[in-house]
Image (cartoon, rainbow, N blue to C red):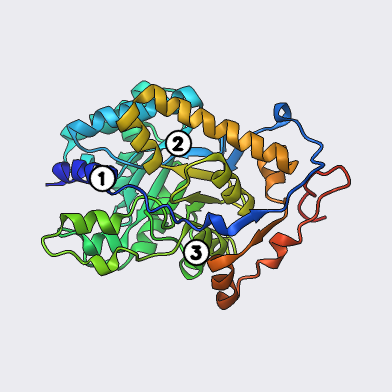
Amino acid sequence: MRMSRKMEHVEHALRIGQVGNQGLADIKFVHNCLPDASVDDIHLHTAIGDLDLSSPILINAMTGGADETRSINRELAVAARECGLAMAVGSQMSAIKNPEVASSYRVVRSVNPDGILIGNLGSEATVEQALRAVEMIGANALQIHLNVMQELIMPEGDRSFKGALERIADIASNVPVPVIVKEVGFGIMRESAAKLIRLPIAAIDVGGTGGTNFAAIENARRPQAYEWLNDWGNPTAIALLESLSVWPRGRVIASGGIRNGLECAKALALGASAAGIAGAALRVLQTEGTAALIDYLRRIHEELRLVMTALGAASIEELWNVPLVVSGESAEWCELRGIDIRTYARRQWTETGRARPSGD
């Protein structure tokens, strides 16, 4: 059942596509006509907690656990290797319960032996299962995903979510790699972010709406759909603003409908240290092939460098300090939620046109 479900998810994700409204259109950069910058001087190095990355682009968790998904993970790993990107695999619980499908995950390490790979389990996992997931792919970090609404809509999904915080804390305290808690596309908001920051985890991935819609995917699998839940959740931009009102910059990942260099730059400028891409990458891979996916990811890097040059931000840390304005639905939401967005608009450039370092 679980193995066939994996390919159903892929097929429905490709058919339904991405929602597209991740809220980043509400984020506007303040133009800098004297940036005093060069594309050649832009550095994309970043960090997620103590995990050093050569790029802020992350190929986020997608699939695994079936013979058909092995080839998808293999080609994603090729793209990650060629572009120097970190890569997360889909939930490994299927391989823990059915060891015969473990090769659909292990292939990523065989293809990319020196890359940064991130394992993945749900919040129902035990410490022992987490250790097995890390060992399975030689993971450099472990994602614990939160997908309450997906499970509730899923015909065979979980119905109890008690004890998740305690299990996550146990895993983070006992695995030898950093733990990242991520949403799958409904958003981590301030109340949950405040609970998570008390745990010994390295970072959170806000996983807002705007990308792959797992409510719609599970409804497509139901005999009687709960279509009224298809728009459940909060956009990525709002999830970022909410989470960053609690979490510090450098420990937050943006994901959910990010497709190009400008959207990546906006997410990073809000305070994210990396941006996860999943659905858009999967579509390119499945419709155009591995070479096209590599070109697509390299193009995002080029676009990001272009935007950072225009803003006078030579690094991700400088990008955190360029002025921007939050408007539209995101601004209205923040006002009602008591989240101060004025500080983003009142950031200062130095006399050279470069973003002023934090604390100035």
Graded by Cα atoms within 10 Å as few (under 14), some (14 to 19) or many (20 or more), the crowding at tag 2 reads many
Residues at circles 3 and 2 in contact by the CB criterion of under 8 Å: no
Q: Residues under labels 3 and 1: Cα distance?
A: 32 Å
Query: In which quarter of the view is residue 157 placed?
Result: bottom left
| Viewport quadrant of the C terminus | bottom right
Q: Residue at x 49, y 54 (%)?
A: 204
Nearer the N terminus, badge 1 or badge 2?
Answer: 1
Label number found at residue 140 = 2
> Could you tell me which secondary element the residue under label 3 belongs to?
helix
**Mark 1 and mark 2: Cα distance apart in space:** 32 Å
The amino acid beneath tag 2 is Asn
Which amino acid, mark 3? Answer: Ala
Q: Secondary structure at mark 2?
A: loop
Dot 1, crowdedness within 10 Å: few (<14), some or many (≥20)? few
Residue at left 67%, top 32%? 43
Q: Could you tell me which residue is drawn at 66 percent across and 42 percent down? A: 316
- The Cα atoms of the two marked residues, 3 and 2, are separated by 23 Å
Residue at left 64%, top 55%? 28
What is the x, y in percent for residue 229? 28, 67
Q: Which residue is mark 1?
A: 15
Mark 3 vs 2, N-terminal side: 2
**Picture quadrant of residue 148:** bottom left
Residue under numbered circle 3:
193
